[in-house]
Image (cartoon, helix red, strand yellow):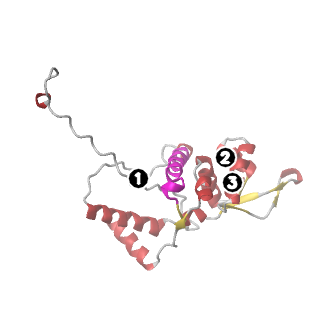
Amino acid sequence: MAGINKTVAESATTSPPAERRAATLEEARALSHPVRLRILRLCLDEALTNKELASRLKLHPGTILHHVRALVSTGFLSEEPWRRGPRGTTEKPYRTTLKSWRLEVADARGGPAVLHAMLDAVGAELDEAGPDAVVESARMAMRLAPDQLDKLRAQLQGIIAGYGLVDEADGDPMAMLIVLHRRTQPHPSPAPAADLPPAWS
């Protein structure tokens, strides 16, 4: 892990990531639903129509159309050129614009809702990908001094900057979720019974 972090941090210094801006309230709301996040992921590698998305996600086309319209109106999806469908129909495919990679969603603009949507979407994607989908995973609890926290955040930011927009034409489609979060503080232990005043006093 340390070797990977070092390599990624070095590559991040040579090609800095694009600047990110704060999401508007409308943009944050558009990202706060797991179905919309799944649509963005599905339309990353190929342009898909409303009907194809409904089939992949096993949802009603009307439901998908509602989410697609919200993503198009906020610039997260774009229409591709229309194409000929079966029996002379016309199909309208959509493609992800990668706009979400350039946004920071602050708590005041729906941060918790977006994170919960993200977790739900990842769970659904893992179920869909099958039992052998996970390459590496870990869940850890730590107590970190301020300088250790700063170092860890820098390493994670290096991974995000180094791999976040890598798109090798012949590469395997992969995904990664990184969440570093605070835990609740432990409650102070109650005073021993001997230190409490008598109930009758």
Q: Nearer the viewer, mark 1 or mark 3?
A: 3
Residue at the spot of label 3:
70
As measured in the structure, the alpha-carbon distance from the residue carrying label 2 to the one carrying label 1 is 26 Å
Q: Is residue 47 visible?
A: no
The answer to whether marks 3 and 2 mark residues whose Cβ atoms lie closer than 8 Å is no
Residue at the spot of label 2:
56
Q: Where is residue 15? Give x, y as percent.
A: 47, 77
Q: How many marks?
A: 3
As measured in the structure, the alpha-carbon distance from the residue carrying label 3 to the one carrying label 2 is 19 Å
Kind of element beneath mark 1: loop
Q: Is residue 22 above or below residue 115?
A: below
Q: Is residue 84 above or below residue 63?
A: below
Question: Residue 39 vs residue 172: left or right?
Answer: right
Q: Earlier in the sequence, mark 2 or mark 1?
A: 2
Kind of element beneath mark 2: helix
Residue 183 within the segment the image draws in magenta? no
Categorize mark 2 by other alpha carbons within 10 Å: few (<14), some (14-19), many (20+).
some
Q: Nearer the viewer, mark 3 or mark 2?
A: 3
Q: Is residue 115 visible?
A: yes
| Residues rendered magenta in the picture | 105-126
**At label 2, which amino acid type do we have?**
Arg
Q: Earlier in the sequence, mark 3 or mark 2?
A: 2
Residue at the spot of label 1:
136
Kind of element beneath mark 3: helix
**At label 3, which amino acid type do we have?**
Ala
Q: Quadrant of residue 90?
A: bottom right
As measured in the structure, the alpha-carbon distance from the residue carrying label 1 to the one carrying label 3 is 33 Å
Report the residue that reaches farthest toward the top: 200
Can you say which quadrant of the picture contains the N terminus? bottom left
The answer to whether marks 1 and 3 mark residues whose Cβ atoms lie closer than 8 Å is no
